[in-house]
Amino acid sequence: MSNEKQVDSGRRGLLVATGAAGGVVGLATAGALVSTFQPSERAKAAGAPVEVDIGSLNPGEMKTVEWRGKPVWIIKRTPEMIASLKNTDGKVADAESKRNPDEFTPEYARNEHRSRKPEILVAVGICTHLGCSPSSKFTPGPQPSLPDDWEGGFLCPCHGSTFDMAGRVFKNKPAPDNLQVPRHMFLSDTKLIIGKDEKGEA
Amino acid sequence: MAAFKETKFPADAPAAQKALGWVDDRFPLTKLWNDQWGKYYAPKNFNFWYIFGSLAMLVLVLQIVTGIFLTMHYKPDALLAFASVEYIMREVPWGWLVRYMHSTGASSFFIIVYLHMTRGLLYGSYRKPRELIWLFGFAIFLCLMAEAFFGYLLPWGQMSYWGAQVIVNLFGAIPLIGPDLSLWIRGDYVVSDATLNRFFAFHVIAIPLVLLGLVAAHLIALHEVGSSNPDGIEVKENLGADGHPVDSIPSHPYYTVHDLFGVSVFLTIFSAVVFFAPEMGGYFLEYNNFLPGDSLKTPLHIAPTWYFTAFYSVLRATTADFMWVLMFFVAAYVSFVWLKSTLARTVKIAIAAIALVAVVGMLPQVLDAKFWGVVFFGGSVVILAFMPWLDHSPVKSIRYRPDWHKYVYAVFFLSFLTLGYLGTLPPTEGRTIVSQVCTLLYFSFFLFMPWWSTMGTFKKVPDRVVFHAH
């Protein structure tokens, strides 16, 4: 065979085409392998947004639904409960939800009542301290393990963190952050979807 | 290529010699042994610092062998993993020994590799022509970190679970793609069975394969250019009549014996830890990891295992307030480069442009401190790779550097150790300030090295290695 570097342009064209085709197949295979890392259909189903009908919810009542393995509370606050937020503004650590907003409070909930509609609060019922689930203490007034000027809110049984009616943590409590408000939106006046908003799924 | 030729042996040659000859004609067995060890000439003035390469090899083998036996009993399933580790510990005959060897092996691996790297820093082992050896070594270090991180999730204890949760969430700090990236890594919305299964695959097959390839590359590169030595002298520049460097000795038998002694000392200490203190006061095996992983309960204090804590401290030191200091530091560094360096103008402009983008990015309105924490965390590891190009000192070894260079190294090692210690503790205001100072010292050591490494009066490097026969 001759060692001279004579290039047959037809064969070179075929080489390039074969190389390109092989490259495409290689990339596609790599793409398939990379895709296997995405959440499986089962994981997605378990983590899918949850639809809730809140038509039957009366003022002052709370409903709990499960989303991604966590309890999510939906509370229809009474006008008194909403008014109590004014009184707790000065006592909570982060009244305007400025700490770690991306993680705990979507843009539309960065307000005093931490919700889209003043009366409807949607929050993940997991204490931001060590992940216990706080209990609801909606009745105002003095009662065991709560301060005498209690306005209504939540008490975490594990380490005593207290939250007001908007899930805002009181000052000098072990929990660092307010309760998480998951991404959510209203599908109608009585239908709510949790885990999804205009910006897409959480 | 010459035609195949069967080596002829006299009829009365020993069978072993004939067999070896038969193999050598078909596979370069004797040649490989001689090139890689048997007739590999190494400088004769190696001191104890030169034991850690061989020890790292030993621990690698130990980890692979114990790991294989652990996989025979371990179950990579979120519901079964924790119990299967306890099963290994309590019910598999001698399972506790295999597991403790593996867990102690992990920590020893890092102790050895850190000492191995310290040796490299002290004697300039990364200098030309050994840049690639250093880069392969750096890649090995990255693989080890990945291996340790993936492996730590497998026992599915509280620290496993939350450590993985925290580290995977770090990727969430990357702008735009972050949250999707952490979701992709986990394969679920929280660390779950999917995460455990893939980490298991990485830990037992993917990373070890890459690691073995890199170790081979590291050794082939080393045996190609030859070992450096505590004097930083190129022994190959002074060849004897036999064609070998006059200051070198064949690895076998000289360093074989030397290494076997080191191995016995190491195994003595290793066994003492395995049998008497496998948890090492919570540093080798964290106490919280004896509780099963619980996605609803975060432990009070999450700390990585000790070998990651220095870099973890850098991450934690990057607070919102500290960003202003860092912005000033970047600006000061760029002005310093402009005034002092002899780099081409275009390179300087590129550096200034990158710095400007970084400073703008550091503004609180642009990217938050959490993201920069991840950047500096990664940067504190990656900067090691640049050593061959940062060090401009005219001598390789610390022995012939100006005495004050030793203090520079001392400050560097002290800041690294301080960062490592602080990383094991919960943060307080005072500790954060100390870790911020150490972070600046750590980065300054590298970033200003092109200048300080050339300053001062260097001692004369002798022509022959310093060696006292014993």
Image (cartoon, grey):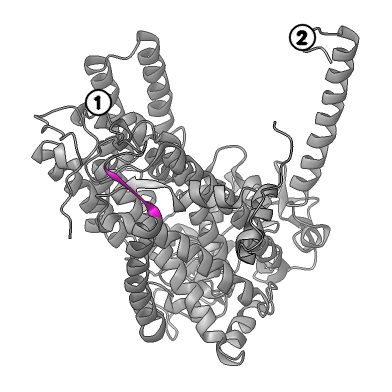
Please say if B430 is above or below B179: below
Q: Residue at x 50, y 56 (%)?
A: B144
Quadrant of the image occupied by residue A5 = top right
Where residue B39 appears, as percent x and y from the top left, is 44, 49
User: Which is more toward the observer, B364 or B136?
Assistant: B136
Asked where in the image residue A182 lies, by quadrant, the reply is bottom right
Q: Which residues are magenta?
A: B247-251
Examine the rendering and report whether any part of residue B60 can be seen. Answer: yes
Q: Secondary structure at mark 2?
A: loop
Q: Chain of mark 2?
A: A
Which residue is at a point 39% across and 80% down the rendered structure image? B271
Q: For the residue marked with disc 1, what is the amino acid?
A: Ala
Residue at 57% of width from left, 85% of height from top?
Answer: B95
Residue at image mark 1: B332
| Percent coordinates x, y for residue A54 in the rendering | 77, 63
Along the line of sight, the residue nearer the viewer: A28 or B179? A28
Against B132, residue A117 (above or below) is: below
Q: Chain of mark 1?
A: B
Q: Is residue B308 visible?
A: no
Density class for disc 2 (Cα within 10 Å; few <14, some 14-19, many ≥20) is few
Q: For the residue marked with disc 2, what is the amino acid?
A: Lys
Find residue A5 and name its label: 2
Mark 1 lies on a secondary structure that is helix
A83 versus A99 height, above or below: below
Question: Which mark, by number, is residue B243?
Answer: none
**Are the residues at dot 2 and dot 1 in contact (C-beta closer than 8 Å)?**
no
